[in-house]
Amino acid sequence: MPGSKSGAIALIVLGGMLAGSASVAAAGDAPKKPAGQSKVDFATSVEAQKAIDKGLSFLLASQDQQGAWLAFDRPHPAITALAAKCLAQDEKYGRDHPAVKRGLAYVVRHVQPDGGIYVKGEGMRNYHTSVALMALAAGKDPAHAKTIRGAQRFLKELQWDAGEGHETSSVWYGGAGYGKHKRPDLSNTQYMLEALKQSGLSEDDPVYKKAMTFVTRCQMLGEVNDQAFAAESVDGGFVYSPANGGESKAGTRATEGAPRLRSYGSMTYAGFKSLLYAGVARDDPRVRHAVDWIRRHYTLDSNPNMPDTASKQGLFYYYHVFARALDAWGEETIVDGANVPHRWRAELCRTLAGMQRSDGSWVNDEDRWYEGNPHLVTAYAVLALQTALGD
């Protein structure tokens, strides 16, 4: 997760127990929802939809005359893409609503000759293009087909590989960062993969296999991670980047007297989701250990395993990636480390509904990574709720 002024701008652009447990399906067999069974109970569904309706009303009222939503004090295509996607995915508005059309028109005005969709000079080309691509995919306008293909191609070209002199032995290999000459990180990489997945890129595409080399090096699991910072670790959670000897926005924690990088929730769900998007088998040790980490650290009260003073930072980013990852996992119940079952969709819906402000927006009082921006945070919350409801 970004952790500086540039990281703040970057975010503008913005399951079960281990195999063998009764709560996890057999490897390779994603569980299916029984016909006619709702993913969320009726009362919770009504409460969540009311929260979504209020959030979308807030966003609709916040759109400016050119169809954009604000980042800091100016319109921004990435914030606009997130808000437009929320509206496009709701049946009361849909992709043909004028606000969606205006929003996407504003986004495509930022298509660059290289196929990327970003603001020149900001250095956030991967984030910008990723969220723009997700919005255009949700819009399902045939007129955007060429733009979507160009954005997919651009994101794949940004991925660090042999073309930039990074072979598989390089810790940069397979990752994505803020742009050329910027070291890769898991947040940028997971957004790239999410965008490619949502826009229909086949999991057979080489970009996923390359990314798995990088994602694996972000996991605190010595069994699969060849980096020294993860040696002998059985933690299973993920950190921000393996570059520069390893980096975690949660800092370090003493382990048997020696400091070790601390894994944390938002990056663990990001890494877990990325493994699933790449088609990694459910009995793969990377997946099994990630699920075990999720089980041990299950919570919606904080961004888990962050230091106490930072546990609310990046909270809505966490809710969004939590929902996307567990939806991809397919299990409706997570059994935590105390063997308490959690219907994660309903719990997430109730948590977010309880945090909504009277004007329909959401804001994080811990304003790191720009979560003091109500347009960004409201989009995160609505997208998480839509995922939880199965939209």
Image: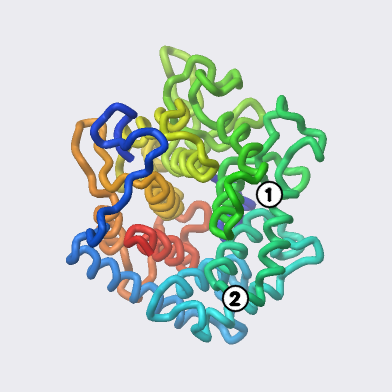
Seen in the picture, residue 274 relative to 83 is either above or below; the reply is: above
x then y, percent, for residue 156: 70, 49
Report the disc number at residue 209.
Answer: none
Q: CA distance from mark 1 to mark 2?
A: 28 Å
Q: Which residue is mark 2?
A: 141
Seen in the picture, residue 139 relative to 150 is either above or below; the reply is: below
Determine the image quadrant of residue 359.
Answer: bottom left
Which type of secondary structure does the marked residue at label 1 adopt?
loop
Determine the image quadrant of residue 306.
Answer: top left
Residue nearest the viewer, comparing 74 with 192:
192
Q: Residues within 10 Å of mark 1 (few under 14, many from 20)?
A: many
Task: Tell me the kind of residue under disc 2.
Answer: Asp
Image quarter in which the C terminus is found: bottom left
Give the number of the mark in front: 1 or 2. 2
Residue nearest the viewer, comparing 317 with 26:
26
Residue at 49% x, 84% y is: 97
Task: Tell me the kind of residue under disc 1.
Answer: Tyr
x then y, percent, for residue 80: 57, 71
Observer able to see residue 63: yes
Image quarter in which the N terminus is found: top right
Q: Which residue is mark 1?
A: 178
